[in-house]
Image (spheres, rainbow, N blue to C red):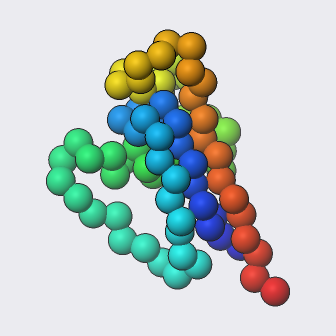
Amino acid sequence: MWISKLNLTNFRNFRSVELELPSTPIVVSGNNAEGKTNFLEALYMLAIAKSYRASTEREMVSWLRPDFGSPLVVAASIQQED
């Protein structure tokens, strides 16, 4: 079983992103402040249903969002091998 698609909206520094993920291991790399830890936090939230970094959900809402009525979304599609 693996996460085949990750959707983030107004989550930390991600305004809106949809990632297709392979069933093989991946390497997360990049410069400082590009969202590597935020990406891992989103995966953790999907597994545990809470953040390991924030004490409230409000702390995870993007400061980049233009509309303060927009929801925070962390969603995924799961695939299972036959």
Quadrant housing residue 28: bottom left
Asked if 30 appears above or below 52 in the picture, the reply is below
Question: What x and y, as percent, mark residue 40?
Answer: 45, 51
Of all residues shown, which one is farthest toward the bottom?
A: 82
x 34%, y 51%: residue: 36
Asked if 76 appears above or below 81 in the picture, the reply is above
Of all residues shown, which one is farthest toward the top?
A: 68
Of all residues shown, which one is farthest toward the left?
A: 31
Quadrant housing residue 4: bottom right
Asked if 79 appears above or below 37 in the picture, the reply is below
x 27%, y 63%: residue: 29
In this rendered view, identify the residue nearer to me: 50 or 6: 6
The answer to whether residue 2 is seen in the rendering is yes
Question: What x and y, as percent, mark residue 61?
Answer: 47, 24
Tell me the quadrant of the picture where the C terminus can be found. bottom right
Of all residues shown, which one is farthest toward the front?
A: 66
Tell me the quadrant of the picture where the N terminus can be found. bottom right
x 48%, y 78%: residue: 25
Question: What x and y, as percent, mark residue 18?
Answer: 52, 53
